[in-house]
Amino acid sequence: MNIAVLGGGVEGNAVKKYFTEHGNHVQIFDNFKDEDIAGFKLEDYDAVFRSPSVRPLDKSWTSMTKYFFDHCKAKIIGVTGTKGKGTTCSFITAILKEIIKDSEWPSRNVWLVGNIGNPSIDVLDKIQEDDVVVFEMSSFQLWDLTKSPNVAVVLRVEQDHLDRHFSLEDYHNAKANIARHQTADDYCVYYSKNENSERIGNLSQGTKTTYPIARTDKVEELLSVLNVPGEHNKENCEAALMAVASYFKKDLNELLSDQNIFNSIKTALSNFQGLPHRIQFVRELNGVKYYDDNYSSAFPATDVAIKTFEDRPLILIAGGKDRHLDLSAMKRRIFDAKNIKKAILIGETKEQLAENEYPEKYILAETLEEAVNAAREIAEKIADDTSQNYNLCLPVTEPLHPVVLMSPGAASFDMFKNFEDRGQQFQTIVKNLK
């Protein structure tokens, strides 16, 4: 076959590698605008694959995700949402691996693929019928999907990616494909406190369950062993538990009543260390704790990170690529939060975030190093003052470590290659502080 791939990157290159190895000719078109596509003579190709961020402008096009769903032999657990997808998928994967390794299916494999960075097509030929696939699914991968996973998990769905989607409605509509094509034999788990998630979940023709869940003694015991901070991670864990129960076609209480399975889940959760750049602890220096939340590319993620440290004095580093989103909610959150002692603002959105705010509440930084140094100075002053008050027996119950948190709430492409590059640069600067 003669195959065209619209867009390079991780998925485009994976498609080229796969089909070239299977004896096909593959041409990648990269670095183009929508209006350029008409000149590619796509009618000369037997198949056209679009990469995730390329809009599905022609119904005859396919994608790596569509091809995978059409050819995958195993059952698929798909997870979508604005934030928390990677962590939830990793919870599910860790739990299933721990359960399965001591079960009657010792040879069964659990494959973690998708938006988390592992192209699904790379492992397609290795997947057997009794395996299970955990697929992190972005709106771009779901955009034109015509099959839904056997178990769909819908986390919170907020505003995001409006620089590529035609509208908020288009974004939500893309997300909805995770449940829209399910059958009566499938399962859907959705977040009941978000109307967008609930609307998507109710499209499913399968068995529907919701979270947050009732925290029984067994559930509380499982959540108590988590090493990742924040109520949001407990909710992500709840979603994962419901997904695993759905995969085994059991009620959660029934699943946890099996002591061997309960012990396997507890082991998996206690060993789970979280994903890089998701409220990741970097180091403690001079009474200050530093956290990297550079995966945060939109306000909902930053909101969650702020809540995680609501009992700590917080210096927040935020800002990044201007994607023409409404930042009013983010501004209110940053400047009204009682625990935020100073906001250090960077990137293209820094002036917009600072507009009409009191100058004493923020600092504008031109570089990340400048931002980290400013945050350090403020945080160490707070740590020193708190320590002195504690030693003088003033009303401080215990010295609370101030936190420097980088949670941009914006994309990274104005100053960095991607969020990993942004996070790594932040961690390098922090680790080099003396």
Image (cartoon, rainbow, N blue to C red):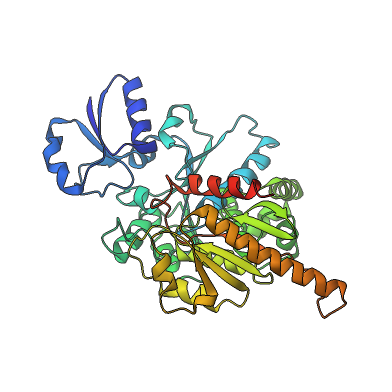
Q: Seen in the image, is 241 located left or right of residue 263?
A: left
Q: Nearer the viewer, residue 391 or 191?
A: 391
Tell me what residue is drawn at x 26 percent, y 40 percent.
Answer: 31
Count of numbered circles on the image? 0
Which quadrant would residue 13 be assigned to in this image? Answer: top left
Q: Is residue 13 above or below residue 51?
A: above
Q: Position of residue 145 (x, y in %)?
A: 33, 48
Q: Is residue 209 above or below residue 30?
A: below
Q: Nearer the viewer, residue 422 or 180?
A: 422
Q: Position of residue 175 (x, y in %)?
A: 38, 57
Q: Nearer the viewer, residue 47 or 273?
A: 273
- The quadrant the N terminus occupies is top left
Q: Position of residue 163 (x, y in %)?
A: 31, 58
Q: Position of residue 360 (x, y in %)?
A: 54, 76
Q: Seen in the image, is 181 located left or right of residue 232?
A: left
Q: Seen in the image, is 234 located left or right of residue 330?
A: right
Q: Is residue 238 above or below residue 122?
A: below
Q: Seen in the image, is 398 located left or right of residue 125?
A: right
Q: Is residue 198 visible?
A: yes
Q: Is residue 211 visible?
A: no
Tell me what residue is drawn at x 28 percent, y 64 percent.
Answer: 167
